[in-house]
Structures are given as structure tokens and as C-alpha cells.
Image (spheres, rainbow, N blue to C red):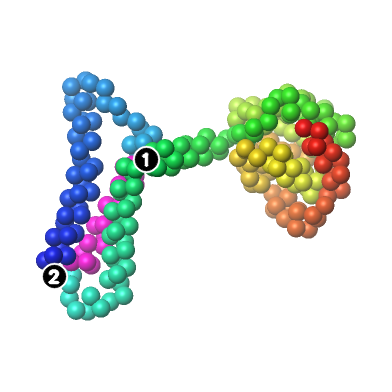
Amino acid sequence: MPDFIKYLLLASFAYVYVRLLIPYVGFFARFMFNESTQWDKYIEKPRLVFYGIGLLLMHGSYSALVDTSQSQLTSLLYPLNWFIFLSGIMLSQITWTKKFRNVFIPKIQEKLKKKNNFSLSATNDQLKELYRGLVNYDMILTEKTDKDDFIKVFKEDWYSHQSKIHFKLDAPSCREFYELLKVTFPKNTMSVIDFFKRSDTIHREDGKPYKYSTVKDAKSRTPISKKSEELKTIFSRL
């Protein structure tokens, strides 16, 4: 039985390494002969990371699994090491599935793109109508935020412009604006911390950014803001 376990573990290592080497030997051969390698860095780099972690788990648990002494076999750590070893195999092999290529990788790429942009699904006309509503109800400082500024903040990368939105709203009202915006345009990447802190695009009338901790807890302290009815009216017209 001890020899069987050792051979089983070695066979698992062989399978994982050979499965990795087969396509990468092809990549290397095509590279050496100046042929198109068909290397897709958006797929292969994450695959190598997953493989590295998987092999690390496998190698880290191997020595404990080949130790088949009575004390080791009765230890609670023995099944845990099997779990770690099998997790390493799964982590490496999942990279060859269609789900990894067609679901996991696109989601990661999308998340990376979203860091510097709200990715708001609103059209420019909808944003213009929203701006008009805020102006009509005196909720935005037009001297510092014109229509173009307003659109840039929501449609362009945060660091590609100097535009800011200067609201004439207290923290609870501004938090309610954020909530209504997310509901009205659900295809976006706005989190509370992105909207009020990381983007550095949402400011108060005095030019200072809203205090994130205050805005974050505003909904629990003030479920209905002072400008609740006006804000709902504005968004109902979009």
C-alpha cells in the first residue's frame, strides 16, 4: 500500500507536468523557427499562475503523504494533506477547461478594466437629462460642473480628465443619488468606495470630497434623505 500511494502521487505529478509541457513545447518550437506561436498572454499568463499555485500545493503536501507511518496515517493532518494535494491538481487542470477561457478570463479582464471607470450604461442623452434635472432642483454647482464635466465623469476614465461633479447635497442625499443611479443603470461598476473615494470625482459644494465613512453609513442613519422626492422625480424621467 505505501508503494502504491507513492506511485499514485508520482503519476499525478507526471500527468500535471506532461499536460503543461505538451502545448508549451509546441509554443517554443514555433518560436525557434520564427513561426506564429499563437501565444495568447491573456490566457497563458493566468494559466501559469494557476499552475504554479497548484504545483506548489502538490509539492508542499507530497512529503506528508508518502510518510505512511502509523502515527501519520492516524493523524488528522493526513486527510488534510490529501485535500491540499487534490486541490493542487484541480487548480492546475481547471485552466484547460472552456469555462476558464470563456468565463473566468473575460470576467477578470472586465474587472481590471473597471478600476478606472464607472462603466455606466447610460447614454449621453440620458446623462444630459439627468444633469438638467439636477440643475432644475438646484442640486449641482453649475459654476464648477457643466454638462460636459458631468458626462466625462460617468463615461470616461477617471484619470483622463480633470472634471469633477460638485453636488449641492448633504451626505444622505448624495448617497440616495448614488443608489438611484445604480438602480436606474444596473450595468455599471460603481461601488460606494469607488464613487465617493477612489474616483475622486464626486465633491461637495465647497470643493472638498465627501467623507467616505459618513456617506457609507448615511443610509442606515437617514433612510430617506431631505431631497428624496426630488431625486426620485428626476430619475423617473430618464
Left or right: 100 as drawn, with respect to 226 = left
Q: Is residue 26 visible?
A: yes
User: What mark, if any, has residue 1 been given in the picture?
Assistant: 2
User: What mark, if any, has residue 98 been given in the picture?
Assistant: 1
Label whose residue precedes the other's in the sequence (1 or 2): 2
Residue neighbourhood size for the residue with mark 1, other residues' Cα within 10 Å, grouped as few (<14), some (14–19), many (≥20): few
User: Which amino acid, mark 2?
Assistant: Met
For residue 85, above or below residue 44: below
Query: Residue at coordinates 69% horizontally, 49% vertically from top-left?
Result: 212
Residue range highlighted in magenta: 47-66
List x then y, in percent, for residue 60: 26, 60
1 or 2: mark nearer the eye: 1
Q: Report if the CB atoms under discs 1 and 2 are less than 8 Å apart.
A: no
For residue 136, above or below residue 174: above
Q: Quadrant of residue 41?
A: top left
Q: Which residue ends up furthest to the left in the rendered image? A: 3
List x then y, in percent, for residue 48: 31, 42
Quadrant for the C terminus in the image: top right
